Image (cartoon, rainbow, N blue to C red):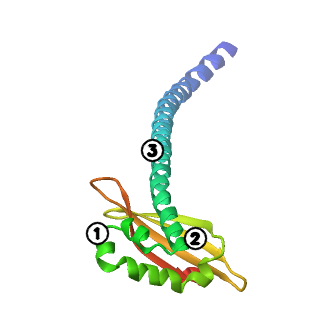
Amino acid sequence: MDNEMDRDTTEETKPRILTAAKSLNRARRTLKIGNALVAVIGIILLALLASSITHAVSLRRSFAGARAVSDQVVTAISKRDGDAARKLGNAEFQSMYTSKQLHDQFIAIEPVTSFSRSFYQQKLVTTKHKVALMYYKYPTKDLAYYIRVAVTQDAKSGKWQLTDITGNADLNTL
């Protein structure tokens, strides 16, 4: 009788064992798909990281050229040298300002730009052309004065050229 009971129990458990085996096989397939999905996502994330690093290095190089030109512009402002600043400008800037006009403007802001300047911040705006905005801070006795120098990278030559100079005590208006 015990034998018969064992047989009945065994016969009853076979479908359960088969169902469990099928579930286990499904779980293994799901696990393999999940591992493959994780690997693909990992590769995509690594590619994005590499792209970001490459872009950051490229931006750093771009800023170096823009910063050099903007430093020359603020040096020209400090020396009240309208001719030097005008030569750094693109064709449009040069058509808008004469060396004398720039010189006169530099003289007008001399009370605030006669103090030592410090580089404040930089922004790169990528539109049709790369435009770098360099901000310089002149701390005066009463308040700070900021100058924003905008330089654009020529698409053909890659050369950075002055496109605008703006100054104000309120940084938010620049």
Nearer-N-terminus badge (3/2)? 3
Residue picked out by circle 1: 91
Does the image show residue 174?
A: no
Q: Is residue 96 left or right of residue 5?
A: left
Residue type at tag 3: Ser
Nearer-N-terminus badge (3/1)? 3
Please name which of the two marks, 3 or 2, marks the residue nearer to the observer.
2
For disc 3, the neighbor class at 10 Å (few under 14, some 14 to 19, many from 20) is few
For disc 2, the neighbor class at 10 Å (few under 14, some 14 to 19, many from 20) is many
Query: Above or below — where is 43 with respect to 65?
Result: above
Relative depth, front residue between 167 and 76: 76
Give the alpha-carbon distance from disc 2 to disc 1, as whole Å. 24 Å
Give the alpha-carbon distance from disc 3 to disc 1, as whole Å. 34 Å
Q: How many marks?
A: 3
Q: Are marks 3 and 2 in contact (CB under 8 Å)?
A: no
Q: Are marks 2 and 1 in contact (CB under 8 Å)?
A: no
Query: Above or below — where is 14 with respect to 150?
Result: above
- Residue at x-position 62% and y-position 77%: 114
What's the mark number on residue 136?
2
What's the mark number on residue 51?
3
Residue type at tag 1: Ala
Nearer-N-terminus badge (2/1)? 1
In which quadrant is the N terminus drawn? top right
